[in-house]
Amino acid sequence: MVYCAPRRMLWAPVLHRRVQRINSMTDKEQELRGLESLDPHAIEALHDRYYPEVYRYVLYRLGDLDTAEDVASDVFVRLLEATQAGRGPRQSLRGWLLGTAHHMVMDHFRRFYAGRETMLGDNLPSGADDPAHALESMEQRHAVQSALGRLTQEQQHALALRFGGGYSLEETADMMGKKVNAIKALQFRALGALRRALTEHPS
Amino acid sequence: MTTRLEDALEACLQSLSRGASVESAVSAFPDLADELRSLLQAAQAASSLASSGVSRHALVRSRIRLLQRAAAIAPARRRSLWPALARPALAGLVAAAALFLGGAGLAAAQSLPGDSLYPAKLVVEDLMLRLASSPETLLQLEESNTERRVDEVRRLLALRRVAPVSFAGEVQQVSSDGLIVSEIDVRLAPEVRLVSDVRVGSSVEVLGNTEVTGAVMAHDVLLRAFDMSGSVDSIGPETWVIAGRSVAVRPESNIVAGVSVGDRVAARVRVDHTGEMWIERAEEIAGPLPTAVPVPILPAPIATQTPMPPPQAEASPDPEPGESEPGESEETESPEPPNEGEEDNSGDSEGEELDFTGVVQSIGGSQWIVDGRVVRIDGDTEIRDDPEVGDIVRVKARLQSDGGWLAEKIEREDD
């Protein structure tokens, strides 16, 4: 199967988001302190800063707007509760959030595995105004989403970070607790598996 | 070989991220081109699932949910503006706001009174007040909310939208038919009766509606803080009597040490939501009192308000005719310095002319506001070129005996 990617490829926003991610440790420490002390300004700021990344990640993995909203919101509630219980992130807040999002997505798949095909229903962003184009786009998304679901959880996590979140190899390695070369190899295997899944199950 | 493929794949992905085509990217690795091409097509497929946008509805619902959870965790000592009886219903209100108001995070933050999202904005503010962990944080939040209310009113007025509003601010000007509060023109509904302490320098809360004329029509003006001065008549553990008025003393009252009965003091007095007056700060003053004994707080018709008082350095109660104590008449007649930031009228005398250019902020039947200045108009005022709100005009006015400016000529200049 030759996949025709939409013209609006997401490389440019990816680069833009990378620039936004350059944060100092001081900021991170302040974010965590504000969370621990239940400072409302800090909670609101932290949520609004990271929610888009978590939401995009979860939506990429699940492909369903409503479920992605629920799971992404759960991630932040879990962060709050973990922080209050002294089990909050020690180093990378973003890594903790996306790692937790990964685990919650897996939990979701475990609970709703049987109904996952139903979950990939009509509630998907089409990104096209023309109905015919929208339908085609949606079918393509379904195909890719289904193919992605045949990969290992680790491969899905890596592709979601690299191609859904736009994180660099180094950032992905940091968030997954692996070395850069390991991520490079994982990415290679994941794309190979995705290619095979798309070829073997084109629809 | 595999490692070389992995490196080549990453190099090609970098090329794609810089805008190169697949063919261009793989051309650097001709011996691996076929393998790389199929991997890059898979990468493009993987990228196609990425979404650049985020649902604003989702963001605001998630934010409210998180703050709600934090509020549940936070100790009960943290205060809320909501009445105690309403607190159990807060979760329901939050859910209702999140689910039924169609809230969108950023849109909610920008919403104005009258918008469907506005209640959600207030719910979030209240949750944040409940979460305030210290008096300082609480004060910051309250100040921030106060500024937000004023900003909302200004935006509504700029948009010429009619909506119910309430906001608090400092009285900057008092005239026969209204006030300027936080640079907002406030007209008084006929039923409104101001207490005499509502004067320049006082803090008030205005309840009313914005109007298309660019003013707020107030149906209530509540005094929140004012300055007073006088002799200390008595000092008790919870109440002081200053110039015949009882004012409470609270732990947060800041009173300069050494004040005793008989001393003369200047005090900033706050009025809480129950109507109780308490001293925010007080200090002894040397020399003669800046004003006579303050008048008691009594409802007074608008007509009894001193129209357009000259700016004061210290917004102490002005004496009203016949209320000065014997022996203090000289003090009450002493001139007061102008307020900082306002036009220096210390040398003004009746008949003096004022000629200035500014933007028309409101147009009323008897007064206009131009660049924050209130100028009265009457049948003799010459108005040229039909100025409207927002126009730049040149104003020639003359000082009247009551301290107000009567416009002789208003002419539009921005054509």
Image (cartoon, rainbow, N blue to C red):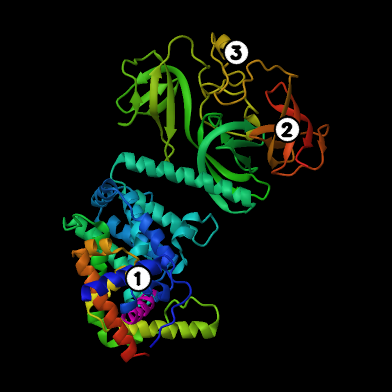
Q: What percent of the width, then of the height, locates residue B155?
A: 57, 49
**What subunit carries mark 1?**
B
> Tag on residue B12?
1
Relative to B37, residue B368 above or below: above
> Tag on residue B333?
3
Residue B35 within the magenta-colored segment of the rendering: yes
Which of the two discs, 2 and 3, labels the residue nearer the N terminus? Answer: 3
Residue visible at 60% across and 18% down?
B322
Residue A57: name its quadrant. bottom left
State the separation of the CA atoms marked 2 and 3: 26 Å
Q: Nearer the viewer, mark 1 or mark 3?
A: 1
Front-lying residue, B239 or B172 = B172
Q: What percent of the width, then of the height, locates residue B319?
A: 57, 20
Seen in the image, is A58 located left or right of residue A7? left
Q: Nearer the viewer, mark 2 or mark 1?
A: 1
Q: Amino acid at mark 2?
A: Arg
Residue visible at 75% across and 19% down?
B351
